[in-house]
Image (cartoon, helix red, strand yellow):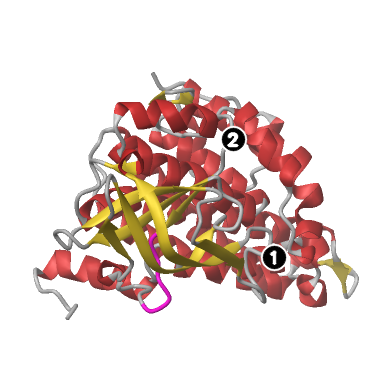
Amino acid sequence: MTTTKPRTRLGEALGTDFFSVREQFTDEQWTTFVSMRRFVDDEVIPVAAGHWERAEICWPLIRRLPELGIVGEEIEGHGCPGLSPMACGLATMELHRGDGSLGVIHGVHSGLAMRSIALCGSDEQKERWLPAMARMERLGAFALTEPDHGSDSVALETSARRNGNGWLLNGRKRWIGLGTLADLIVVWARSSVDGKVGAYVVERGTPGYEASVIEGKGSLRSVWQADITLTDVRVPEANRLPAARTFADATRVLAATRSTCAWAALGHATAAYDTALRYVSSRRQFGRPLASFQIIQQRLVSMLADLTAMQLYCLQIGRLADAGRLTPTVAGLAKMHNTRKARAIAADARDMLGGNGILLDHHVIRHMADLEAIHTFEGTETIQTLIVGRDITGISAFA
């Protein structure tokens, strides 16, 4: 049942809900949104810039995520919350409004590692791993991307060779979030038996698994991505996910993350717009508030128009996902649109803050930098464009 939400101070703090989108939320979705907004405002934003500057993971915030009832997202049972897709989107939006790195940590653990096990694992595997992961007692990672295969991930070369009652994994992975920290790493590899792609859960401490942090990042600095080398890493048959039989099964997991990127971009854009609006309302130049100048008002309205369009994209993909009708192509179009618009909003906000726009104290430069990663991962704008182009023309531009 949809209920009309009061225009509380919390709601007004958005400064962005021009089309009263919040009135479309169910009670479950509203409760998720409110709890996440308070968490982000009270606990995330005050410490995010410092951790970002030092490129360090904020473990106290990570340990708080299970208490918020969002770890495991839509998964039902096994200690997971079984949230609606819309509630998951709102949680993602708020996490990224505070700190993109924290949002990515949650997305890798819940949206990729846990979802892989939930979609492709056996009942025994789900019960073995998911409850501890829902409590974040065991951290998960998702290893698909390879050094020589970014957008062309279907061409992965990591191999899985039969070895008695198990498998030996050999190959390399790159850009693997939490790859140096995770207790369980879902590795996608090509079977030497039939050449098909499957998923194998590598547990921490397994001989032959080596991971190193990728240094020098200027984006998402508070989450560590890894280069991984697999050298005769033995995985028992009990750790092979039985329902992961082809690359299409990896695509099933990734399909949901495209919509996650659209929600994440909305969170970053919301933060940038709200900061710009507050700044120009209080900053005085030439004896007047910046907000009193026509060109500033024109830019704010343009930013708000794009932000509102992003909200409506997310509202609709949330509705489609709730109804089980969200397709990868629609999610890809939303990801492409929202990351593009978010980058423009963040750039405008940074410019409107003048020299102060490059200071982490105002957060905008951090969101601007983090958006560069979101714009790229889970399928670049170019790749999403070609996927949607194939859908509307019936002609593939891929080789």
> Does dot 1 land on a helix, a strand or a loop?
helix
**Location of residue 133 with respect to 358 vertically, above or below:** above
Q: Is residue 186 left or right of residue 227?
A: left
Residue flagged by tag 1: what amino acid is it? Answer: Arg
Report the residue that reaches farthest toward the front. 164
Quarter of the rendering containing residue 31? top right
- Residue 366 marker: 1
Task: Say which residue label 2 marks.
Answer: 136
- Range of the magenta residues? 144-148
- Classified by dominant secondary structure, the portion drawn in magenta counts as loop
The picture places residue 350, in percent across and down from the top left corner, at 69, 71
Q: Tag count in the figure? A: 2
Q: Residue at x 16, y 69 (%)?
A: 390
Q: Residue at x 88, y 75 (%)?
A: 286
| Nearer to the camera, 161 or 143 | 161
The picture places residue 109, in percent across and down from the top left corner, at 51, 45
Q: Residues within 10 Å of mark 1 (few under 14, many from 20)?
A: many
Residue at mark 2 to residue at mark 1: CA–CA distance: 26 Å
Q: Is residue 224 left or right of residue 155?
A: right
The picture places residue 242, in percent across and down from the top left corner, at 24, 41
Q: Residues within 10 Å of mark 2 (few under 14, many from 20)?
A: many
Q: Residue at x 60, y 67 (%)?
A: 212
Q: Is residue 145 magenta?
A: yes
Q: Nearer the viewer, mark 2 or mark 1?
A: 2
**Location of residue 238 with respect to 161 vertically, above or below:** above
| Nearer to the camera, 351 or 95 | 95
The picture places residue 227, in percent across and down from the top left corner, at 53, 69
Quarter of the rendering containing residue 352? bottom right
**Location of residue 13 with respect to 225 vertically, above or below:** above
Q: Is residue 387 magenta?
A: no
